[in-house]
Amino acid sequence: MSQKTPNIVGIVTVGTKGQIVIPSDVREIAGIESGDRLFVLTKSDNSEMIGLCTEKGLEDLMANINQKLTELTEAVSSAKEKQSR
């Protein structure tokens, strides 16, 4: 399974109130619009932030993970069935 490398598309600065401004070209690339909710993604141990994701992007990610898990479950079942013959 290949792992995708990160793609840096912009840099943001955290203001005094903890807010960030996402550059307009980055918002356009990501399809982010005013009022969108973004989810902050971190490593499992919360050691560092790895990205922001729109609600739609998170839904798509979860659907993809669910599909991959279904495929894996079916492959394991098929392998077990062949082994038991």
Image (cartoon, rainbow, N blue to C red):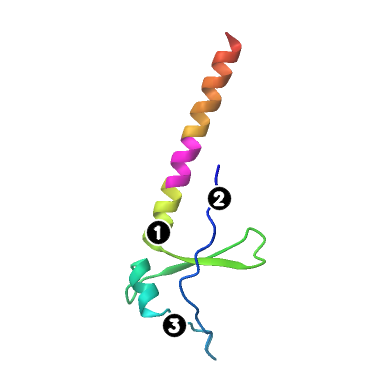
Q: Residue at x 36, y 79 (%)?
A: 24
Type of the residue with mark 2: Gln
| Dot 3 crowding, Cα within 10 Å, few <14, some 14–19, many 20+ | few
Where residue 12 is drawn, which disc sits there?
none
Residue to which mark 1 is pinned: 57
Against 19, residue 70 (above or below) is: above
Q: Nearer the viewer, residue 79 or 37?
A: 79
Residue at the limit of the structure toward the bottom, as seen here: 16
Whole-number angstrom distance, CA of label 2 to CA of label 1: 18 Å
User: Closer to the observer: label 2 or label 3?
Assistant: 2
Q: Nearer the viewer, residue 36 or 72?
A: 72
Type of the residue with mark 1: Gly
| Dot 2 crowding, Cα within 10 Å, few <14, some 14–19, many 20+ | few
Residue to which mark 2 is pinned: 3
Mark positioned earlier in the residue sequence (3 or 1) = 3
Which quadrant of the structure image shows residue 26? bottom left
Question: Which x, y percent locates residue 76?
Answer: 55, 26
Q: Range of the magenta residues? A: 64-70
Q: Residue at x 34, y 75 (%)?
A: 35
Where residue 21 is drawn, which disc sits there?
3
Q: Residue at x 50, y 38 (%)?
A: 69
Mark positioned earlier in the residue sequence (2 or 3) = 2
Residue at the limit of the structure toward the top, as seen here: 85
Against 57, residue 17 (above or below) is: below
